[in-house]
């Protein structure tokens, strides 16, 4: 309700209330936004909550939004291997393995050598072994220290390896060569962790084998919809006479 002047209060006291001048000041979601309320928190000085000066009570409403992933969104693995999506293709256009399984994500190989985060390569290999399952026959030299119960495993295993004392290179090669075949009796990935991939658009095989495996990929909060920015007129740089940068 708007604050009344002394004259208006006097007139209202004499003639009674005809109609109040009120304005809706409810907190609303910004224009064009939508979502689902997933939580409401109330903070007050009575509960000894820390609040800014001059604020006695604060209500926080948490709204969750479903955002479909799009070109320009930022993804990251667990080894500092981050990057943005360059293109999203239909599943039938993605490269596929000899048994027809399409790959989900293609990573640029230039993101590995200079940064030297080899963890993503090891995770890819071990992820493939854990997903496929394995069967170690005989007593190969690399498997001497492996407990008997770990010599055989069914597909979809959950495994972990210590950070600095994890699987050695020869153990990785050995495990990759001992993975179980798929339902057609084929082993997709060789002992070096690479497989023959076929171009989804032409059906032709790529000229060289490609590293294939499983790894965790997370979606970061840097979404392209929040980054987009445009302006009409505004301040210009004195030196270059170009518009000033930045969203603010």
Image (cartoon, helix red, strand yellow):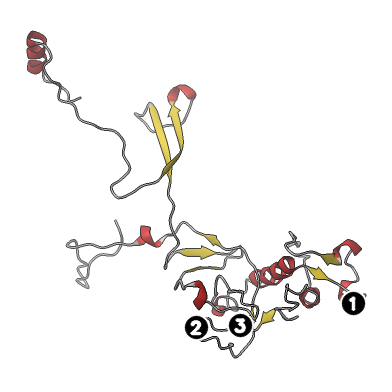
Mark sitting earlier along the chain (2/1): 1
Q: Callout 2: few (<14), some (14-19), or many (20+) C-alpha neighbours within 10 Å?
A: few
Task: Tell me the quarter of the image containing the C terminus.
Answer: bottom left
95 over 151 or under it: above or below: below
Residue at 67 percent of width and 81 percent of height: 195
| Left or right of 87 on screen, residue 30 | left
Q: Mark 1 points at which residue?
A: 140
Determine which quarter of the picture holds residue 78.
Answer: bottom right
**Which residue position is annotated with label 2?**
201
- The crowd level at tag 3 (other Cα within 10 Å; few <14, some 14-19, many 20+) is many
Q: Where is residue 83 in the image (x, y as percent from the top left)?
A: 50, 69
Percent coordinates x, y for residue 169 in the rendering: 77, 76
Q: In the structure shown, which secondary structural element does the residue marked by tag 2 occupy?
A: loop
Quadrant (top left, top right, bottom left, bottom right) of the N terminus: top left
Name the residue nearer the viewer: 129 or 248: 129
- Quadrant housing residue 102: bottom right
What kind of element bears circle 1? loop
Q: Considering depth in this image, is 213 or 163 the residue closer to the camera?
A: 213
- Tag 3 and tag 2, C-beta contact below 8 Å: no
Q: Tell me the mark number nearer the camera, choosing from 3 and 1.
A: 3
Tell whether 165 sits left or right of 41.
right
């Amino acid at each position: 309700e708007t604050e009344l002047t002394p004259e208006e209060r006097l007139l209202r006291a004499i003639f009674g209330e005809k109609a109040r001048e009120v304005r809706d000041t409810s907190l609303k979601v910004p224009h064009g936004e939508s979502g689902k309320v997933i939580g409401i928190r109330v903070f007050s000085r009575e509960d000894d909550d820390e609040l800014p000066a001059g604020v006695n009570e604060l209500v926080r409403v948490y709204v969750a939004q479903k955002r479909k992933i799009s070109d320009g969104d930022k993804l990251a693995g667990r080894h500092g291997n981050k990057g943005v999506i360059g293109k999203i293709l239909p599943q039938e256009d993605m490269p596929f393995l000899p048994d027809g399984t399409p790959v989900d994500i293609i990573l640029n190989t230039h993101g590995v050598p200079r940064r030297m985060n080899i963890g993503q390569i090891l995770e890819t290999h071990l992820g493939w072994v854990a997903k496929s399952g394995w069967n170690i026959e005989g007593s190969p030299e690399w498997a001497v220290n492996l407990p008997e119960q770990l010599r055989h495993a069914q597909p979809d295993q959950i495994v972990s390896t210590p950070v600095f004392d994890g699987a050695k290179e020869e153990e990785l090669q050995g495990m990759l060569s001992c993975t179980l075949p798929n339902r057609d009796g084929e082993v997709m990935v060789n002992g070096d962790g690479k497989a023959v991939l076929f171009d989804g658009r032409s059906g032709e095989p790529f000229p060289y084998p490609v590293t294939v495996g499983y790894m965790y990929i997370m979606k970061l909060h840097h979404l392209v919809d929040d980054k987009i920015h445009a302006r009409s007129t505004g301040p210009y740089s004195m030196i270059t006479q170009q518009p000033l940068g930045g969203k603010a």
